[in-house]
Amino acid sequence: MSLKVYVPQDSSAISVGANAVAEAIAAGNTDIEIVRNGTRGLFWLEPMVEVETDQGRVAYGPVSPSDVESLINQGILDGDQSHSLSLGLTEEIPFLKNQQRLTFKRLGIADPLSIEDYVAQDGFKGLARALTMTGQECVDEVKTSGLRGRGGAAFPTGIKWQTVLGAEGEQKYIVCNADEGDSGTFADRLQMEGDPYALIEGMTIAGIAVGANKGYIYLREEYPHAHAMLNQAIELAVETNYLGDNVLGSEHSFDLEVRLGAKSYICGEETALLESLEGKRGVVRAKPPLPALEGLFGKPTVVNNVLSLSTIPVIFADGAEHYAGFGMGRSLGTMPFQLAGNLKQTGLVELAFGVTLDALLNEYGGGSASDRPLRAVQVGGPLGTYLPESQWQTMMDYEELASFGAVLGHGGIVAFDDTVDMAEQARFSMEFCAEESCGKCTPCRVGAVRGVEVIDKVRSNTDHQENIVLLSSLCNTMESGSLCAMGGMTPFPVKSAMQHFGEDFGISSSKSNEQAS
Amino acid sequence: MSRDTSQEAVLERASLRASVLDAIAANKHLKGSLLPILHDIQNSLGHIPSEHVVDIAEALNLSRAEVHGVISFYHSFTTSPHGKTVVEVCRAESCQAKGGRLVEAAVKAKLGVDFKQTTDDGEFTLEDVYCLGNCACSPSIRVGADIYGRVTPESALQLIDTLKTADAS
Ligand SMILES: Cc1cc2nc3c(=O)[nH]c(=O)nc-3n(C[C@H](O)[C@H](O)[C@H](O)COP(=O)(O)O)c2cc1C
Ligand code: SF4
Ligand code: FES
């Protein structure tokens, strides 16, 4: 058997040169097998090359094509670890070692498209178990796990499934929300590129649970690589009967189709997403009716995020109690946090709920990439609050964050150093809302445009005091008068920026607290 | 607006229409087929020709206004042709935190256009994009299926030069 060398095929790894590195290694070494695995999620080290040894896999990174010659000469194919890019055993790298990967237990280990490797790593074990259970037993298992939606709203997944199970109707649908619009987040993409069968398995189990035979993955157009991976994985799963008619010889059939979004952030909101899947403008629907009862094409529909669905297999394979054994309070299980922005060590950190933001930033993230002090951290995507240092001891748990108006959202964490201008950030939040509003309600559609104008006046010191007051009341109007969280939460980053970083708006800090409230 | 009736213009319209009809035929069987149809047309033609919207509308039993409404809602769809190469620069927060605004400015200055505009020579269209899921390697740029990470103003300008040469050869 030839020596295995791993070079990730993840699109972020490729974005920093992984393909060129793989080619350079292959060029001089015909007797080795290059495996294009998924990424391990240690992105500051990408492209990260791993070599199989008797002790385990040894990692090197970040490797550029021009490093390859010296690495080979130094003897990395014989397990040499003295090169300056050597990182030692992959599994011993603290960033990885100190994680609790459940949803992402397979990430980066093998070729993501190999069904054989997937099965060897407990893949389809959950599906096999679900096939022996009734729909109600499946739903109960999800309820027991405590899993809450990872797309942002954190609604209990089991309860959503129960509603769909109980709904009348021949035709029901499972829709996977793979719109991953939140900036600073990439875990859905890692899941789909790095372990696509887990999503397929999770959706199939959802189908068995609620009685749906058709699933759609609504994927953002910005992810061409994930699109290709999903289509290949679906094809292979159909060939091996993990998908399609009579899954694994059972009475359950399940078909899966990928549909592309078209660069619209609001289409991540579940009802706008359904409109878009139906071929319409992505305008938010008023609720009720709940999508669970009248969803896609008017039929009962489960809409779940990629991570929620991809966590289902491990819950079914290892048992709901095992999963619920992680986490705290009402936030059970693990959360895939995504470290982005100005951090030394960016990447995926899956941990039980309850870790502090500070630990994520400084222990896992290694502090700022620029070596300047970190100043503000946006948690939970573009609609999430900016947290100043005084709030970094917060434990990452849905309720803890909510207690002061922050959100965990999809788990994105974007750090800024002290060069950030928070008034500019606030302006961007309003600009983004103006650009992406679906237009259905006035406070959002018009409010965001006005918000940009008002912040411009504040920044140029035109009628400063008046405009500060105006901005606060505009925020309140948007919060209380918008139909969905787009208009309703855009004020979160804006108000938190004003409240904690008042000096950037030309207001003194004692005053900024009053202004923003 | 008077129609160009020169032979070339007629042929051009016929070939555009053929692409539109192909896209309709390839996707019409799908439920909710409008977006897949529009994607196919946008991909093959670089835009969705307004004068053939009527074909889509007829095939799907929709009004022309409805189809236009959908096209105008989504940032991916355009009714006028874009440049040979579309460069998408990420403007979202993680990229901002890593100097993305400098990359934006450098690319704009180099191409001499703003977002959503095409260079006079028809070579490049510059688009803004809000996150490419590449945030752990910010700042990011996308060109077609290729994503570029850890971009600096300098490397962005080099990239554009490379794309120019690749296009010319
Ligand atoms: C403006 C807006 C954008 C959203 N974007 C996404 C998204 O990109 N991905 C996602 O999974 N959920 C998104 N959501 C949340 C969805 O509406 C919905 O709660 C989620 O798909 C349900 O799945 P879950 O329970 O598994 O999280 C968004 C919500 C809003 C209001
Ligand atoms: S808040 Fe904005 S995005 Fe949401 S429904 Fe209203 S207009 Fe549409
Ligand atoms: S914010 Fe630019 S790639 Fe995510």
Image (spheres, grey):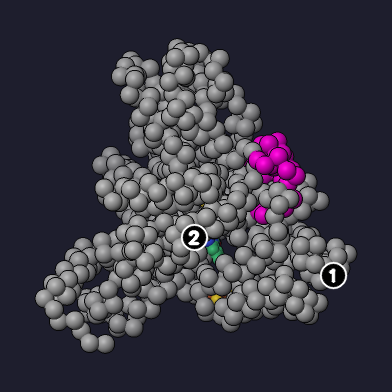
Question: Where residue A144 sits in the image (x, y, percent)?
Answer: 59, 48
Q: Secondary structure at mark 2?
A: helix
Q: CA distance from mark 1 to mark 2?
A: 40 Å
Under mark 1, the amino acid is Glu
Q: Chain of mark 2?
A: B
Does the segment drawn in magenta span residue A382?
Answer: no
The correct choice, above or below, for B94 with respect to A282 in the image is above
Under mark 2, the amino acid is Lys
In terms of image quadrants, where is residue A169? bottom left
The correct choice, above or below, for A511 with respect to A390 in the image is below
| Residue placed furthest toward the right | A510
Please tell me which residue lies in front, A126 or A72: A72
Question: Where residue B127 sits in the image (x, y, percent)?
Answer: 44, 62
Please tell me which residue lies in front, B28 or A341: A341
Residue A207 seen in render: no
Q: Secondary structure at mark 1?
A: helix
Question: Where residue A129 sits in the image (x, y, percent)?
Answer: 43, 40
Dot 2 corresponds to which residue?
B108
The correct choice, above or below, for A421 with respect to B157 in the image is below
Magenta stretch, residue numbers: A351-379
Question: Where residue A115 sits in the image (x, y, percent)?
Answer: 35, 35
